[in-house]
Image: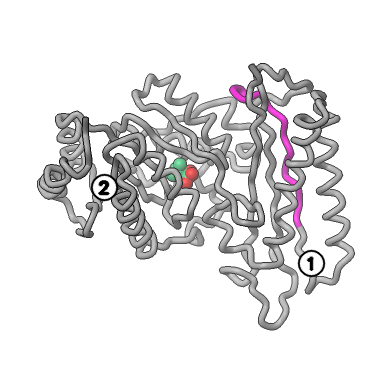
Amino acid sequence: MFTWRRQFSTAATLLKTAAMAPSQPTTSFQVFRDVPPLRTLRRQILESNRTVGLVPTMGALHEGHLSLIRQAASENTDVVVSIFVNPTQFGVNEDLSSYPRTWDSDVAKLEQLNAELTAHNTHGRITAVLAPTAQVMYPTLPPSSEIDGDGSFVTITPISRKLEGASRPVFFRGVATVCMKLFNIVGAERAYFGQKDVQQTVVIKRMVKDFHVDTEIKIGPTVREADGLAMSSRNVYLGKRRREVGLVLYRALRAAAEQYHAHGKLQRSQILEAAERVTKEVIAEQRGLAPAERALFEVDYISLADPDTLDELEVVDPSKGAILSGAIKMAPLEESRAGEDCGLGEGKVPVRLIDNLIFAPRV
Ligand code: PAF
């Protein structure tokens, strides 16, 4: 059986020979900017009967990402973390440049996590970080974010048009395309995604099935802050006031889920009206406050959908379960108070919050 201690010197040798492109040496993993050196490492890992778990990220790593990496390290000998802010999943009106980029702290977190994995004698380690340039990921054309833009894209319809896709029409095309590229580059046995982005997990699973991609998709649970807010790289833009009000989404979803779990309600209207009550109450409360006190938001959707097709359900079939999900748009603060913590961007960046709860199939 593979043990990390026994194989560590072999792994270190493999890494030295494989990382031939411009890379930044770190103490416990190598950073790859280009594809061929990573492929060399991948071949060597395969020949040593070891396995790779891929954790795709756009950086700005938080505990949600770290928990996926821990899961990947417990199920694989080698973990590859990709860090790439993928331009094609941002629409033309979405600000790609404002996405948080925190390379140094990301690397420090990964180093620390590898030390933790060693201390706990976990099966695997972070072996490589893939941080390619946009030119490497999109070698032929400058990547387009236009809906009818040219390029080599993977489109998974109709599920990509629903829910998040209705507000962000190029988002899942960009996600599916970049994940297909990452899966082709890394050739991982398993790839890890967080349940928080539930529609993304449905799209990726469908893509893997329909294109016969030989990578198993594993979903890790949503990781929450102490107050229940689902962790997201974008939460840094919220600030205290919008963050407190933004908790309304999780509260609304829990109120709806309670109708199903505790009261046995199966009808859409019975389940969703509980969520609507919560959001309407908070909207009314906030509108009644002065501009320097309130945080306004709009509900984009609250959905009760089939777990595979994402079709909206009129009635939940408990043997199939359902996905209860929602999105709200936190508006920029109208006025800030002196000394107030308004988050990165001083409260001026609109923030979209998404969250979900899964009704697992009952056997
Ligand atoms: O969830 C994310 O961070 C991104 O959508 C992903 C999967 C890394 C693709 O860019």
With 123 as the anchor, is 313 left or right in this view? Answer: right
Q: Secondary structure at mark 1?
A: loop
Which amino acid type is shown beneath numbered disc 2?
Ala
Q: Residue 65 placed where, x, y %? A: 45, 48
Residue drawn at (27%, 32%) of the image = 51
143 in relation to 219, above or below: below
Residue drawn at (34%, 23%) of the image = 214
Q: Residue 40 placed where, x, y %? A: 16, 38
Q: CA distance from mark 1 to mark 2?
A: 45 Å
Q: Secondary structure at mark 2?
A: strand
Q: Quadrant of residue 152?
A: top left
What coloring was used for the rendering?
A: one colour
41 in relation to 32, above or below: above
Q: Quadrant of the C terminus?
A: top right
Which amino acid type is shown beneath numbered disc 1?
Arg
Whether residue 181 is visible = no
Q: Which residue matches tag 1?
A: 294
Q: Which residue matches tag 2?
A: 128
Which residue range is magenta in the image?
297-309
325 in relation to 314, above or below: below
Between 335 and 285, the residue placed more toward the observer is 285
Q: Residue 243 placed where, x, y %? A: 67, 61
Residue drawn at (42%, 35%) of the image = 177
Q: Quadrant of the N terminus?
A: top left
- Which one is in front in this view, the residue at disc 1 or the one at disc 2? 2
With 313 as the anchor, is 129 left or right in this view? Answer: left
Task: Please tell me whether the stretch drawn in magenta is mainly helix, strand or loop.
Answer: strand
With 327 as the anchor, is 59 left or right in this view? Answer: left
